Image (cartoon, rainbow, N blue to C red):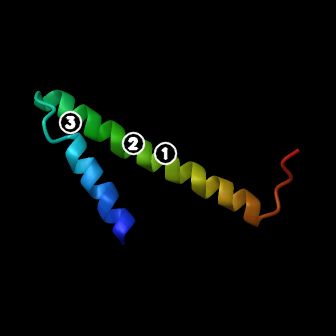
Amino acid sequence: MKKILLVKEIYLEAFRNLGHIIIERYFKFFAWFSFVMFFIVLYAFVYRIATGFAFD
C-alpha cells in the first residue's frame, strides 16, 4: 500500500506545475498509455511463461 501511495504522489507531483493545459493533458495521456502498454507486455510475458513457451 505504501508503494501505491508513493507512485500516486510522484504522479501528482509530476503534473502539478506544468503550465499549459494541452501539454499537461498530453503528458497525462502518454503516462496512462505507457502504464497500459507496460501491463499488456507484462501479461503477455507471464502468459508465455505459464504456458511453457520455449524462449530459444
Point out the tag, 2 or 3, that comes first from the N-terminus.
Answer: 3
The amino acid type, in three-letter code, at marker 3 is Arg
Under circle 1, the secondary element is helix
In the rendered view, would you say 13 is above or below 26? below
Quarter of the image for the N terminus: give it: bottom left
Q: Are marks 1 and 2 in contact (CB under 8 Å)?
A: yes
Front-most of 9 and 39?
9
Mark 1 residue crowding within 10 angstroms, few (<14) / some (14–19) / many (20+): few
Point out the tag, 3 or 1, that comes first from the N-terminus.
Answer: 3
What residue is pinned by disc 1?
37
Under circle 3, the secondary element is helix
Q: Residue at x 21, y 46 (%)?
A: 13
Q: Is residue 55 left or right of residue 4?
A: right
Q: Quadrant of residue 24?
A: top left
Under circle 2, the secondary element is helix
Q: Residue at x 39, y 42 (%)?
A: 33
Disc 1 to disc 2, C-alpha distance: 6 Å
Disc 3 to disc 1, C-alpha distance: 18 Å
Residue 20 position in % (x across, y down): 11, 27
Q: Residue at x 64, y 54 (%)?
A: 44
The amino acid type, in three-letter code, at marker 2 is Phe
What residue is pinned by disc 2?
33
Front-most of 29 and 14?
14
Residue 54 position in % (x across, y down): 86, 53
The amino acid type, in three-letter code, at marker 1 is Met
Residue 47 position in % (x across, y down): 68, 61
Mark 2 residue crowding within 10 angstroms, few (<14) / some (14–19) / many (20+): few
